[in-house]
Structures are given as C-alpha cells and as structure tokens.
Image: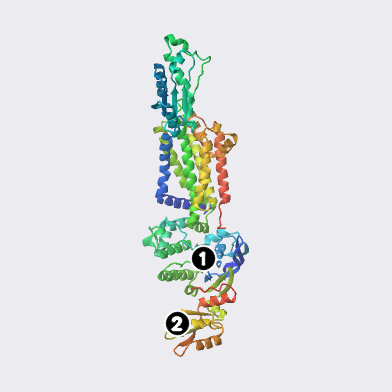
Amino acid sequence: MSALAIDVTGLVKRFGDKIAVDGVDIHMPKGEVWGFLGPNGSGKTTTIRMICGLLRASAGEGTCLGYDIAREADQIKMSTGYMTQKFSFWNDLTIRENLEFVARLYRMTPLRQRVDETLETLGLTDRQHQQAGALSGGWKQRLALAAVTMHAPKLLLLDEPTSGVDPQARRDFWDEIHRLSTNGITVLVSTHYMDEAERCDHIVYLANGKLLTEGRVADIIQESGLVTFRVEGDSVRRFAGALQQLDGVDHVSYFGNALLVSGTQREIIEHAVEAATDASVRWQEVRPSLDDAFIALMARAGGDRRVHA
Amino acid sequence: MTMGSDTFARISAIFLKELVQMRRDRLTFAMMFAIPVLQLVLFGYAINTDPKGLPTAVHVEEQTPIVRTLLQALETSQYYDLVMQTDDPRKSAALLARGEVAFVVSIPAGFTEQLIRGERPQLLIEADASDPAAASNAIARADAILTSALRHDLTGALKSLNPGPNPFELITHAKYNPEGITQYNIVPGLLGVILTMTLVMITAMAMTREAERGTLENLLAMPVQPLEVMIGKITPYVTVGAVQTLVILVAARYLFAVPFIGAIWPLLLGVVIFVLANLALGFTFSTIASSQMQAMQLTFFFFLPSLLLSGFMFPFRGMPHWAQWIGEVLPLTHFLRIVRGVMLKGSTLVDLHVDFLAMTAFALAAVIVAMLQYRQTLD
C-alpha cells in the first residue's frame, strides 16, 4: 500500500467554460498535517471535493488512501472525514442526535457509548441536548469536528474549519488537530490564517486553480526571495508613503508602531530606507511573513496582485 | 457483517433522522394532519354538484290559483328558493345580472286564461348559466316539476287540458348513489386528493431542503447509497399517509355516512400502492428541483391535472379523448376508481386489476427516474 495518503496528478475541474482547478498535483504522505492555502476562488474547496469523491474530476487521476478517486468513492468516504466550509450538520437536530445519526450511518457499536465518548472528548457533553442551530460558531465547529472524526477516519479533509471562530476556539481546535495527528491521522486543512499555516508540516498554495508553490514554511519564504526590514522610531508612519514610492520596495505594511518594508533586493531596500527616513529611526532585518512571501510569489507569477489584508 | 444489515442500518439512520426532524417542524407536522380534516370539512360539506335552494326572483303579472300552484311546486322542489317578487322585467333582469338571483321566473298576464283555453301559454325561466353546473339540474327538472303540479289542479271541467300520459314510461335508476348524494362521490375521492397533495409536496421538499440548507454536501460525503436515502426518507411519510387514510375513512363513515360495500383489503392495498407512487414521484421532484420553491411549483404542476383530469372534479368519460389519455397516466385516476369501486360498488381486486397494475407501473417508473436523477456528487 502506498505511503501517500493523497496522490493525485493533473487534477482539472471545469464548470462549463470556467476552469476552477487547472492541473493540480498533490502527493501527501500519511501522518502529516498539511495546510492548503490560496485566495478565495483559487480552487481549494473544489480540489478537496474531488479528492473525497464529491466531485468528478474533468481530467487527471489519482488515489486517496489508496482508493481510486474516480471509481472508489464509497471506500474513500468510509475512511475519510470531510468537514465542509459551511456548517453542514442538521440545525434542527441536537448535538447528540447529529452524532447518533453519523454513528448509525457508519454502524458504530455500541452506539450510545461511542457517542458518549465523542461528546466527552470534545467537551460537548453538557450541551448534547441543544439544537445545533442554536449554537455559536465555535460550538458548531466543535460539533462538526466531532462528527467527522468519530468514525476514526484515516484522513481528515478540513475546509476552512476555523473561519469565524474566536482565537481561543481556534487554539483549542488546533490542539485537537495535533492530538489527532499524533494518533496517526493525516490532515489536510485549508485556511486563510498564516499563523495556522505555520503550524503545518507542509503548505500547498493554490492561485487561480493552479499550484503556485508548496513546501515547508521556511522553504517557501526562502523561495520568495523576499527581504523584510522592520523600521521603528517616533511617528515612523509618516515615512510609509515615501517608502512605498521607491523602486525596489514591493510592499510596506504597518505593524503596530513599526513599518515592515519588503522587497526582493537587499541593497536597494537598505539604500531606500536610509534615503527615505531620518536619523530618528532604527531598522533591522526580520524574517519575512508568509503573507508577504505569497504576495511576492503571486506577483512574480504574474497573477493576482491584490494585497490581502 | 453483511451488506444487507449495513443497508438496513443506514436506512434506519436516515429514517430516525427524518422522524426527529419531522416531529420538530411543528407547523408542517400539524399541517399534515390538519389538511385532511380541513379539506374534508370544506369539500365534504361545501361542494355540492346538485345544488338546490338557488335564489329565484318571480315576476308575476297575475295572481290565480294555477299560478300559485306552479310557484309552490317550484318552491317545494327545493331547487328554487323564491326569494323575491318583482313587478318590473328590467328590475328582474338586473337582479340576474348582478348575480343576486340565479333564476327569474316570469308568468305573463293572461297566462291562466290562455291555459284554460288550451292555447299553451308561455312560462319563462331565465337562468344565470355562467356556471352551467349550478343551473342545469334545476332547469332540467323544471318541466317535470311544473307539469306534475298542474296535473293535480286540472281536474273536473279542466280535465281535458290535462296532458295525456306519455306514450312510454321512463324509468331511471341512479345506481350506487340513488339519492345522488354528492358526498358519497366526493369523500372517497378526497382520500386520493389529500394523499396526493400532502405526500408529493412533503417528499418533494425532502431532498431540496437538504440541498438548500447545505446539508446535502455532508450527506453525500458519507457512505450512504441513493436507494437507502430514498427509503429512509420516504418511510416516515408512509406512516403519515396511513394516518391520513384512517382519518378520512373514519370521517367518511361517521361524519358523512358514506356506505362501504366492498372488502377493506383491496382498498388498503390500493392505498399502499398509491402512497408509494406519490412518495416516489415527490422524491423524483426533489431530485430535479434545486430549491424548495421549485419543488413546490413542480408539485402543483402535477397536482392540478390530477385534480381536474382524474375524474375527481368532473366526470371522466365526459372529457375529450386526449384528456382521458392524460388522466389514465395519473395515479389518482386509478385510485379514485379503486376507492369508489370498493366503497360504493363492492368491487373486488379482480374487477379492478387494471387500475392496480396501472398504479404499480407509475410507482415503479417514478422510483426508476428518481434513482437515475439522484446525484451522488455535487456536479
């Protein structure tokens, strides 16, 4: 059996004239936690759906957990857990009823005990008789995670699981992901949060349906060739406009009371910063952010030049 | 662990989920049982295809015993309710135009004298025939009512005026419903109409609701087969159909005293097949429609011809052939024949086998289309 949890090559998905995914390769080893990044509409959800058998690929082929994605969707569904971007459990069922439904579909026995355990593990016991529709975003997300993990899947596909939940819930969620990962579950998680991306073993970045880059966080930053200087000082913000105008400076962003000035050529930026500021500022080189690295990579690829907040 | 028990487990998972959701949706749940009762009361008591007591204005230009006899005969027939007298033809015409009366009976001056002289005077009944069904029976019977009334009066010296006996004796037999009680026909028919409306609509909503609420994606991501989803979703509504049937049959017996001549088993078998046919059709609709609104429209697209062309509203044999052909396709047409046949005529399974087969064929076709339509992916 393959050591790869996901092994797909040249995946394409067309909806009419529109190409949502345009030749994506993913070769993901078992047991890792991978981050799936990219702007809205870059094809992340479509790719995940093709991997778990919810959409038929227009072209390309591959396997998920060793099962063919075109022909063995049923087997894939048995051993993956897919958490949709939008909450997709039943709002008019209670937490417990939702879990019981899932447990019955997967024929888990003894039913009551398995549901009780899942409720306990995810801290849902006290709320088990609340209807899902009445839960806040964080609790809904917890319910969804409980429901997609209770049949002990080998692979978890999580589509923006933490959008719209508070920082505490996000942190708890990631603790849970790492706990599952320690137990050998492979996790592919799409996200817009760079701090979450940095928690992943490996990152895949999609843009306009194509794979822009992939690798470890540090590798991607290095690949971007980006250099970032942190400029600090009294009312340093007044220099932002001038800095942004200079050749060689790709991006200036506010970081609290400091400015982060990024570009690809070290000397040019150094001179630029010196020229555009005065003696009252201090500056030092810092590690570029993943955000800036992606934006630089996108710009270089001639793609979307929008600056994402 | 066999495939069979897996399937059963998944069907019961869907079934239990539907049951909870059905119970929780209080309004819909209440409607499923309120609809039959409401429609029974409405149609059962309100619809009458042999309307009587129709408001009638009388324009009489002379008062004689014979005229009084004629008017009294109309009144006694119960078809005509003589609500007012006018002395102006224009006024009576206006009453008719405004719909305040359904008939105007005019008896001209000199009517009695002409009658006695054997000059066959004219008696005019003007009817508001904008709804032909409303007036036709009353008009059809007017002649007989009036003639027989005169027979009693034209005695003694006037006996010669008495119309002679008809050259033949006409015997009519209104079979199965001799008194022509509308309810005997309407109430069994309502069983089919109510089942069609509630069951098709509810199941048509079943899958579209999942799609609209985003839960379909979740359902598709789990290892459950289309047929399992369909059976699991339909089964709770079979129960609903059974309860509705019970309500209507009890009402038919105790509220409307509809006779039940045949055996109960052919009727129940008919109900089962008919319910399945409707549920399968509803499920098919829900795989075609992409929103609950569309599902609703499809339901009415089907419901209206069922109502109009099945023989529920209008006599089936009175329709043009092409309309009868459409009617023959509809399960309601066959179900009505079965229900009316069993209840009013005592028909047996053998008598009705064509209708049973036709309904079964429809049910099977609906299941097959539903299975072909059901998408296992989000494509």
Amino acid type for the residue under numbered disc 1? Leu
Foreground of the two, A16 or B97: B97
Q: Nearer the viewer, mark 2 or mark 1?
A: 2
Chain of the residue under label 2: A
Q: Look at 46% across and 79% down and name the residue there.
A: A254
Which label's residue is closer to the chain start, 2 or 1? Answer: 1
| Model colouring | rainbow
Above or below residue B276? Residue A105 is below
In the image, B270: left or right of A167? right
The percent coordinates of residue A155 (x first, y second) are: 52, 65
Chain of the residue under label 1: A
Foreground of the two, B190 or A83: B190
The percent coordinates of residue B331 (x first, y second) are: 53, 39
- Considering every residue shown, the one lying at the far left of the view is A126
Determine which residue is flagged by label 2: A237
Neighbor class of circle 2 (other Cα within 10 Å; few <14, some 14-19, many 20+) is some
Determine which residue is flagged by label 1: A157
